[in-house]
Amino acid sequence: LLAFSTTAMSSTLTAAECRRRYAGAFRPNPWIYWGDFSLSAGIGWAAFAFSVHAPLTLSVYCGVTLIAVIALLRAAIFIHELSHLKRGAVPGFETVWNLMVGIPFMLPSLMYVGSHGDHHRQSAFGTANDPEYAPLAQHSRLQLLGFVGGIIFVPLLLTLRWGLLGPLSFVIPPLRRIAVEQASSLIINTDYRRPFPTGRATLRWWLQEIATALAFWGVVGAWGIGVVPSHWLVQWYVVSAGILLVNQVRTLAAHRYNNSDGRPLTAVEQLLDSINLDSWPIPTVLAAPVGLRYHALHHFLPAVPYHSLGALHRRLLTELPPDSPYHRTSQSGICSAIRALLQKPGPKGSVQPSALIFQQK
């Protein structure tokens, strides 16, 4: 809730009011989605193909692999947009995303579409029902190192989930509950339990699970008969782990993670626990693509498509005074946000409900 005051009147700028004032910012542009995603995926897969086909020196291999990781990370992060787009807003986009990125990396969109909504529910944010929140500000540096480093094993776990656990869970009912509740979501909160899909989501789950399992066993079979060389699989693992590693570091800069008691937070507390990365260092731009730099604004207005967040953020920074709470959501970059997390501010760093009022210049 943002309260704007003028000399003539005082009015409350709610999410609904923002939709009225900035209506153009809420409309997704399919041309931007298709163009950005296609270019990112094309560059990423071209770099991947070059890295496994050409004889390369170590330095060239590392450079090409880095390009593949950064470009495919950007393509993969569109899964976040999929979780917020209304059905039909960009027709066919989810299907193409799954075919080009999701299924090849064993990350079908069902792993985020559906569960990510719990992260935005005010009653769930910061609690045990939030899949993407943990009190990381209370963790030691060694624990945070394990939080980041452990992600390199996830590609192996994903192949086991979709290649073995998924198919077996259809014939062994007790495994089905484990597969759905604990092994079908991108999380950092290990206490989170995902509900079973209902309605149309059930069919989407079946189709994506079957397609991902077939892709896994198709590659295994092709490798077994020598069509897919072993070094392709190694490179797939390297790029997959690289994408997840960069994103895991970026996750440390998404929130302040101060809610150690797991209580529900108000809308303003949720906003102030979130972070906008407000400058343009190249590592931040590359590691937090597709609107993830404006995470605090995204939590206030989750329906705004990624391509509108930057302009809307700059407009709010201009309209609001420098001492407004919205400005307090800003960090200069990922490194700055992680340094603040490592300082472990404790109670003094917690967000305060009294920060409700945003006054316009």
Image (cartoon, rainbow, N blue to C red):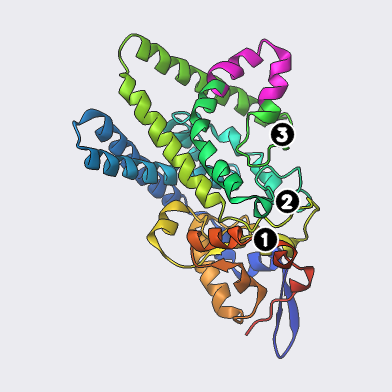
Residue 326 vs residue 279: left or right? right
Q: CA distance from mark 1 to mark 3?
A: 24 Å
Identify the element where label 2 is drawn.
Answer: loop
Numbered tag placed on residue 273 in the rendering = 1
Q: Earlier in the sequence, mark 1 or mark 2?
A: 2
Numbered tag placed on residue 194 in the rendering = 3
Give the amino acid at mark 1. Asp
Residue 120 vs residue 254: left or right? right
Identify the element where label 1 is drawn.
Answer: helix
* Span of residues in magenta: 161-179
Residue drawn at (50%, 56%), measured in percent from left and top?
291
Residue drawn at (32%, 18%), measured in percent from left and top?
228
Dots 1, 2 in contact, CB < 8 A: yes
Q: Is residue 169 magenta?
A: yes
Give the amino acid at mark 2. Gly
Q: How many marks?
A: 3
Label 1 environment density (alpha carbons within 10 Å; few <14, some 14–19, many ≥20):
many
The quadrant of the picture occupied by the N terminus is: bottom right
Q: CA distance from mark 2 to mark 3?
A: 16 Å
Residue 31 point in image, percent of width and height:
42, 51
